[in-house]
Each structure stands twice: as C-alpha cells, then as structure tokens.
Image (tube, helix red, strand yellow):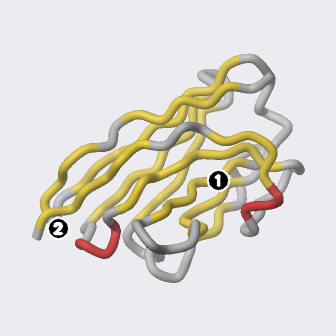
Amino acid sequence: QVRLVESGGGLVQAGGSLRLSCAASGGSLSAYGMGWFRQAPGKEREFVAGISYNGHITSFGDSVKGRFTISRDNAKKTMYLQMNSPTSEDTAVYYCAVAQGIWVEEPPDRYAYWGQGTQVTVSS
C-alpha cells in the first residue's frame, strides 16, 4: 500500500514562493506518473501539474503555467511543486497523487493513491 505525505504548505505572501513536497512510502513509484491537485472551498478538485514516471514529461493546468514547476526524485521517492508568484487564487488544499500509468494524467480518476493534503494560503 502506497502512502503519500505532503509537506511545505502554509501562509505565503502574494508574489513570493513556496515549495511543496510529497514523500512516498510503501511502494516503488519510479514506474508511475504523479501529479498535484488542489481544491478550494466550494470548488471541484483541479489538476495543477503532472509528471511522467521518469520526470521527462510534465504538464500544467492553465492557471499555473509559467509560475509553477514540478519535479521528482525517484531515489528519494519524493515529488515537488515549486510555486512562484502565487496569487490569492492559488489558495487551496494541495494534494499529491500517484497515477495508474507511467505518463502524465489529468483526470483525478486516473490516480490510484492520494495524500491527505496540505493547506496553502496566499495573502495579498
């Protein structure tokens, strides 16, 4: 059973930066794509970024393109989300997830394992 734990969330000023981490245990993740999602109060879960099993292919939601980057270190079983120039619109609970396949996936139902989430609040 794969277990995912997000960290690095908190309060950040608009225009600043924040890095989220997702540490995995209980399985080998090097054969699976991974992703970050977020959910704000009253809104549906939204795809933020995804990365292929080897880190060579990435994809981003339109609202974060050019501001966020995603990376992974398979040796450390950890994935990262670097958030640059956040705005109040980025305030949400951020979740990391492991995909069912090796490539980048966007629909949430293409992910098999989820973390418990970490709150990110952007102050303006």
Identified at 72% across, 68% down, the residue is 106
Q: Is residue 55 left or right of residue 115?
A: right
- Pointer 1: what residue? 35
Tell me the SS state at disc 1: strand
Image x and y of residue 80, in percent: 49, 43
Label 1, residues with CA under 10 Å away: few <14, some 14-19, many ≥20: many
Identified at 66% across, 42% down, the residue is 114
Image x and y of residue 52, in percent: 75, 52
> Is the residue 83 above or below the residue 31 in the image?
below
The numbered mark, 2 or 1, whose residue comes first in the sequence reads 2
Tell me the SS state at disc 2: loop
The amino acid on which the numbered mark 1 sits, given as a three-letter code, is Gly
- Pointer 2: what residue? 15
Q: Is residue 67 left or right of residue 65?
A: left
Quadrant location of residue 28?
A: top right
Quarter of the picture containing the C terminus is bottom left
Residue at far front of view = 42
Identified at 19% across, 49% down, the residue is 11
The amino acid on which the numbered mark 2 sits, given as a three-letter code, is Gly
Identified at 58% across, 46% down, the residue is 96
Please count the marks in the image: 2
Residue 105 tag number: none
